[in-house]
Image (tube, rainbow, N blue to C red):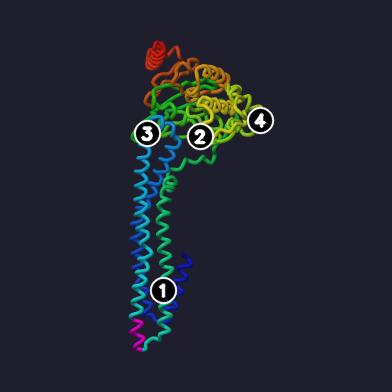
């Protein structure tokens, strides 16, 4: 752009030294260049944006079909997948063709405008030569300058065309960049050196959408070392509660404190170090089993890793693998079973040795026998630690000091297992219906 601007200024100066009048003829074509570039860029921008959208849809579809090819084949949906691919691909081809066609008009149109100026100079220059107002050498030199003058303009117009394609791509990136930023840590953020694990929710309210309330005026006090079980139907706000605790979401009102300190006054990194999480959806990265377990503690020794695996009852199956602890888990973690993945995430949490535990249906992917073993390991792990246990299988949380029953974002019942059963309320219905279903299945 800088080179083009300097070149254009240089050619204008040289043309003015030969003939100001002919220079005006050349400059008269400038608005045409601007109008043509603006119109084409505006038109092509729409199709470039459409092209990027369809390309994203196509890439997403291909990835989904590739990662879920077993499901596609199991349900015999290959034809539907191909038809969907062809439909998106055709839309991409159409958008791409239109974008390239319209942008392709730019260069010939610029040449056409350039030739208009060339014709005007040739006519006026020819007349002036016959009247001896200019020499033929001057006209030839001027024509050369005018032709050279248009080249950087054409190049600039083409650059503008490429920029339209780039903007269409960048818009998708800017959508992410324009998202609301995470609230930064306060300057005087504190660090709790030796957390005890006392947690309080005071008048906490939270909603994903402003007009749709989820958690309203929630109050809860958890004593250090206690196990708190959170139960309730799907969408009751159980997982949201622990996400608020770790500041993955910010509460709308009220406050949450740990050991009397508002979590908003604690650095996020330090706050999250207090927690150990085992989720229903396991997450393992492409690396060795040893590295995946060691992810829970920086600089963990091999002895600590093995002890954590033993505590999670994962050591036996790890040693049966070809490379043992050095077995590499592939990118999709498909070379070990779902239950084995769950055991590794539990081992990782054990190694982390946190003060507060969050277990979100942590044993949902393991068999009954392994679940019993893990429950024992968890009991040892949970001693002296504050634990939040989200459970659907109510048989796993009978020993919890406090069971919170949530529905529609509110705590509707609270107490231990015996107290809640004696009340005969929501929890009792939930518990009895679960075992009624199990008894029916056993009878069948």
Local SS, label 2 = loop
For marks 1 and 3, the one nearer the N-term is 3
For marks 1 and 2, the one nearer the N-term is 1
* Residue 160 locus on image (x, y percent): 41, 60
Residue 124 circle label:
none
Q: Is residue 441 above or below residue 322?
A: above
Q: CA distance from mark 3 to mark 2?
A: 22 Å
Q: Nearer the viewer, residue 420 or 330?
A: 330
For marks 1 and 4, the one nearer the N-term is 1
For marks 4 and 3, the one nearer the N-term is 3
Q: Nearer the viewer, residue 226 or 264?
A: 226
Local SS, label 3 = loop
Find the magenta span and give its range: 124-131
Local SS, label 4 = loop
Q: CA distance from mark 1 to mark 2?
A: 59 Å
* Residue 384 locus on image (x, y percent): 57, 21
Q: CA distance from mark 2 to mark 4?
A: 26 Å
For marks 2 and 4, the one nearer the N-term is 4
Residue 388 seen from this side: no
The residue indicated by pointer 2 is 332
* Residue 224 locus on image (x, y percent): 54, 22
Q: Nearer the viewer, residue 150 or 173?
A: 150
Q: Nearer the viewer, mark 3 or mark 2?
A: 3
The residue indicated by pointer 3 is 77
């Amino acid at each position: 752009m800088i080179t083009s601007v300097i070149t254009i200024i240089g050619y204008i100066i040289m043309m003015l030294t030969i003939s100001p009048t002919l220079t005006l003829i050349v400059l008269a074509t400038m608005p045409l260049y601007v109008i043509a570039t603006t119109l084409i860029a505006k038109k092509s921008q729409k199709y470039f944006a459409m092209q990027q959208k369809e390309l994203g849809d196509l890439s997403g579809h291909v990835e989904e079909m590739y990662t879920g090819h077993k499901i596609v084949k199991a349900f015999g949906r290959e034809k539907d997948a191909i038809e969907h691919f062809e439909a998106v691909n055709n839309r991409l081809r159409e958008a791409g063709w239109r974008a390239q066609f319209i942008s392709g008009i730019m260069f010939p149109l610029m040449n056409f405008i350039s030739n208009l100026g060339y014709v005007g100079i040739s006519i006026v220059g020819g007349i002036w030569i016959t009247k001896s107002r200019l020499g033929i050498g001057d006209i030839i030199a001027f024509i050369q300058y005018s032709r050279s003058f248009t080249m950087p303009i054409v190049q600039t117009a083409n650059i503008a065309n490429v920029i339209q394609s780039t903007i269409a791509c960048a818009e998708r990136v800017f959508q992410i960049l324009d998202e609301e930023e995470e609230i930064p840590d306060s300057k005087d953020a504190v660090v709790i050196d030796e957390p005890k694990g006392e947690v309080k929710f005071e008048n906490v309210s939270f909603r994903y959408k402003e007009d749709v309330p989820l958690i309203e005026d929630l109050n809860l006090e958890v004593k250090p070392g206690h196990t708190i079980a959170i139960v309730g139907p799907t969408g009751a706000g159980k997982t949201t509660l622990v996400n608020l605790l770790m500041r993955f979401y910010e509460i709308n009102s009220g406050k949450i404190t740990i050991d009397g300190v508002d979590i908003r006054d604690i650095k996020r990194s330090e706050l999250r170090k207090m927690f150990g999480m085992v989720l229903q959806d396991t997450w393992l990265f492409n690396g060795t089993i040893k590295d995946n377990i060691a992810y829970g503690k920086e600089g963990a020794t091999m002895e600590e890793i093995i002890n954590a695996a033993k505590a999670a009852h994962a050591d036996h199956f790890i040693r049966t693998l070809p490379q043992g602890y050095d077995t590499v888990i592939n990118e999709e973690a498909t070379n070990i079973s779902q239950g084995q993945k769950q055991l590794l995430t539990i081992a990782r949490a054990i190694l982390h040795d946190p003060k507060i535990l969050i277990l979100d249906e942590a044993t949902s992917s393991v068999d009954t026998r392994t679940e019993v073993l893990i429950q024992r390991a968890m009991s040892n792990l949970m001693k002296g630690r504050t634990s939040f246990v989200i459970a659907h299988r109510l048989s796993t949380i009978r020993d919890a000091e406090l069971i919170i029953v949530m529905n529609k974002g509110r705590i509707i019942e609270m107490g231990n297992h015996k107290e809640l059963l004696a009340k005969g309320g929501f929890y009792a219905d939930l518990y009895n219906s679960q075992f009624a279903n199990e008894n029916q299945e056993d009878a069948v």
